[in-house]
Each structure stands twice: as structure tokens, then as C-alpha cells.
């Protein structure tokens, strides 16, 4: 084993999905990672990807990636309906697994996936990049300014209005590939952000309305989550509306607002805290205005890869938090989907 191999985590990638080059770029930026091998069901696509992205090897199929002794970790950007199979096979091959979201069709699948990773001594993590941005830690440090607890959360996640081609051909509206539609593709982030603000306590109930559905897949939805401590989270996710990714958290003494909670700018990622918002006595004037806090020079994709690669290389211990966060997010997603499919019935989480 060479020093180079010891110093870097060599990554295999299962599939040539459109998001995969973004991860390859993050691997190249990372201090401890190397994008090594691409596998695809189409060997020609794999070779093209290898050439364009500068990887060492390409494979016709995914098995060769898992059989490669040089590969320490795998990234799985396959359709959701394939995540269970290839996560379990990867774990059985001794590869650490970074899996795209949504992680599975339902909690049963995700439980099998995370248990397989635990059984084979490998790390599991889902690809929620904002979890790794230094801004999130800064937000956590500021939550006390909202009062004793966060009481209400509003958030939205949508991207530019999809066109006819999207609704005719994109896998996000195909029940055989992405049966959770906008709830899994977009709402997963709203749910995770809500869990973060609730210190990862599960909500008690969920209610969801599917406003538009295509092929049995939700494409526009609103959701309400109610948490045991009284926090309420309302969010919208949609394939039909302009790009929005804002979140607002409010307590009895203040408010925290972020315009881009999903894709924080790597140069300057901001959020705003507005505390003591009530009018003061006339002699004192009006309460202080909002404070903008900025986190600079943090590429969340790179940090995610570096964090994961350190675990895969044995420089950091395996962290059960990441599997637990995925399981909780999936549990809430299941409740949301059930409510939406049953015309907005209140569902226990």
C-alpha cells in the first residue's frame, strides 16, 4: 500500500447521474479524497465520464467498483428505488456509503440499509450537504436569542419551474424511480432543517396536502409538522415554482432567517437574527435592528467529503449520528407521504 493510498480515500461512484460531477469536484478539492472509479450500466457512458472527469478507471456495471480493492468508499447517486440494493451490496463489500437523498422508498428500506452498514463496520451518510456548512453551527449558537425554544418554523424549497420535458421524462416524476416526488427530492431538506431546529426530536404528527400530482407522484405540496415541545413547522416544496430555499425560525424573543439554507454560498453564507423585536418605550426609541452573521470560505460539499473520508480512512470514529439523522428524516417523510396520499389526514409520526 502506497503512502498516497494511505493519505487519501479513493472513491467509487455508482452511476453517471447529473449530480455526480459536483461530487467529483468536491473530491478533488478535498484534502483527503480522490475520485477513483466510475461504474455505469452503460460501459460507454462510464468511459466518457471517466475521460471527462479525469478518473483512473471505468467499469461496465457497478459490481466491478465494489470489487476494486483500491476503493474505500462509494457515492451512490442512483434513483431512490435502487438505493437499498446497492447500499447493502456496498456494505457487504466493505465499502463506506455516501447515499443520495431521499435514502429509500420507506423506513423499512432505510433500516435495512443502515443496519447492513453497521453490521459490516462501514459508515453510512446521506448527501444533505447543508449539514456540513460551518454556518449551521453558527446558527445553532444563535438559537438562544430566539427565546427558551423555537416555536415556529416556515420554509420553502423549490427550483425554477419545470418545463414540459421535465414532466414528460425526468425520473423525479416517475414512480418506478422516484416515488416520493417533490417530498423526497426537495422536502427532505425542509424536514432535516426542522429536525435540526428541534434538536432531532421527532415530530408528534404530520399533515400534508398534495396540490399537484403526476403519475401518482407529488409535484407540489404543503406540510405541517407538530413537535412534542410545541414547535410547529410549515413548509412548501414544489417542482412548479421559481427557485426558493428560505427558512425562518421564530421564538418568543426573536427570529432567525436564512435565504439559502440548502445551498449556502461558499464565499459568504449569511443568516439574520432579529431579537428583542418589540417596540421599546418612546424615550428609548425602537429596538435594535437585525444582525447579519456571515460565514466565509466554506464549501459544504468539500467539508462533507472530507468529514466522510476521515471516517473511511480510520482517522475519525464511525459516527452513528448520520444514520440516525437519515432514519428520522425517512420516518417523517413516510408520515408526510401517507398524509398526502390520504387527502391530508393527520398522521402520527
Image (cartoon, rainbow, N blue to C red):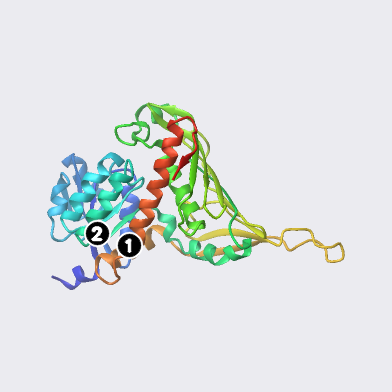
Question: Measuring 33% from the left and 47% from the top, which residue is drawn there?
Answer: 103
Q: Nearer the viewer, residue 31 or 345?
A: 345
Which is more N-terminal, label 1 or label 2?
2
Q: Nearer the viewer, residue 242 or 334?
A: 334
Q: Position of residue 195 (x, y in %)?
A: 47, 54
Q: Nearer the viewer, residue 14 or 237?
A: 237
Q: Position of residue 312 (x, y in %)?
A: 25, 64
Would residue 291 be found to the left or right of residue 202 on screen?
right
Q: Which residue is mark 1?
A: 320
Establish if 36 lies above or below 234: below
Q: Which residue is mark 2?
A: 118
Q: Position of residue 336 (x, y in %)?
A: 44, 40
Give residue 18's quadrant in the image. Answer: top left
In the picture, the quarter occupied by the N terminus is bottom left
Question: What is the spatial separation of the Cα atoms under label 2 and label 1, in whole angstroms?
Answer: 9 Å
Q: Is residue 108 visible?
A: yes
Question: Which structural element holds mark 1?
Answer: helix
Would residue 242 be found to the left or right of residue 182 on screen?
right
Amino acid at each position: 500500500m502506497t503512502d498516497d493510498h494511505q493519505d487519501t480515500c479513493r472513491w467509487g461512484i455508482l452511476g453517471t447521474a447529473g449530480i455526480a460531477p459536483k461530487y467529483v469536484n468536491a473530491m478533488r478539492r478535498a484534502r483527503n479524497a480522490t475520485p477513483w472509479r466510475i461504474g455505469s450500466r452503460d460501459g460507454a457512458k462510464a468511459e466518457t465520464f471517466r475521460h471527462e472527469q479525469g478518473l483512473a478507471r471505468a467499469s461496465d456495471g457497478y459490481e466491478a467498483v465494489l470489487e476494486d480493492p483500491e476503493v474505500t468508499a462509494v457515492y451512490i447517486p442512483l434513483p431512490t428505488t435502487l438505493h437499498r440494493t446497492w447500499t447493502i451490496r456496498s456494505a457487504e463489500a466493505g465499502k463506506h456509503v455516501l447515499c443520495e437523498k431521499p435514502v429509500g422508498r420507506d423506513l423499512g428500506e432505510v433500516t435495512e440499509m443502515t443496519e447492513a452498514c453497521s453490521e459490516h463496520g462501514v459508515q453510512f451518510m446521506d448527501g444533505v450537504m447543508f449539514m456540513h456548512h460551518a454556518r449551521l453551527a453558527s446558527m445553532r449558537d444563535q438559537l438562544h436569542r430566539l427565546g427558551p425554544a423555537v416555536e415556529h418554523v416556515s420554509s420553502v424549497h423549490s427550483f425554477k419551474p419545470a418545463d414540459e420535458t421535465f414532466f414528460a421524462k425526468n425520473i423525479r416524476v416517475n414512480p418506478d424511480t422516484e416515488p416520493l416526488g417533490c417530498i423526497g427530492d426537495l422536502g427532505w431538506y425542509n424536514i432535516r432543517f426542522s429536525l435540526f431546529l428541534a434538536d432531532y426530536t421527532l415530530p408528534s404528527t404530520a399533515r400534508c396536502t398534495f396540490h399537484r400530482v403526476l403519475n401518482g407522484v407529488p409535484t407540489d405540496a404543503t406540510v405541517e409538522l407538530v413537535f412534542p415541545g410545541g414547535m410547529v413547522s410549515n413548509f412548501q416544496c414544489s417542482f412548479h415554482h421559481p427557485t426558493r430555499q428560505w427558512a425562518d425560525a421564530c421564538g418568543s424573543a426573536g427570529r432567525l432567517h436564512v435565504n439559502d439554507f440548502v445551498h449556502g454560498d461558499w464565499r459568504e453564507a449569511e443568516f439574520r437574527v432579529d431579537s428583542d423585536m418589540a417596540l421599546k418605550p418612546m424615550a428609548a426609541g425602537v429596538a435594535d435592528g437585525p444582525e447579519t452573521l456571515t460565514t466565509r470560505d466554506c464549501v459544504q460539499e468539500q467539508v462533507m467529503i472530507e468529514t466522510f473520508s476521515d471516517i473511511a480512512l480510520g482517522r475519525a470514529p464511525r459516527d452513528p449520528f448520520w444514520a440516525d439523522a437519515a432514519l428520522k428524516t425517512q420516518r417523517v417523510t413516510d408520515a408526510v407521504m401517507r398524509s398526502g396520499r390520504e387527502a391530508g389526514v393527520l398522521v402520527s409520526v
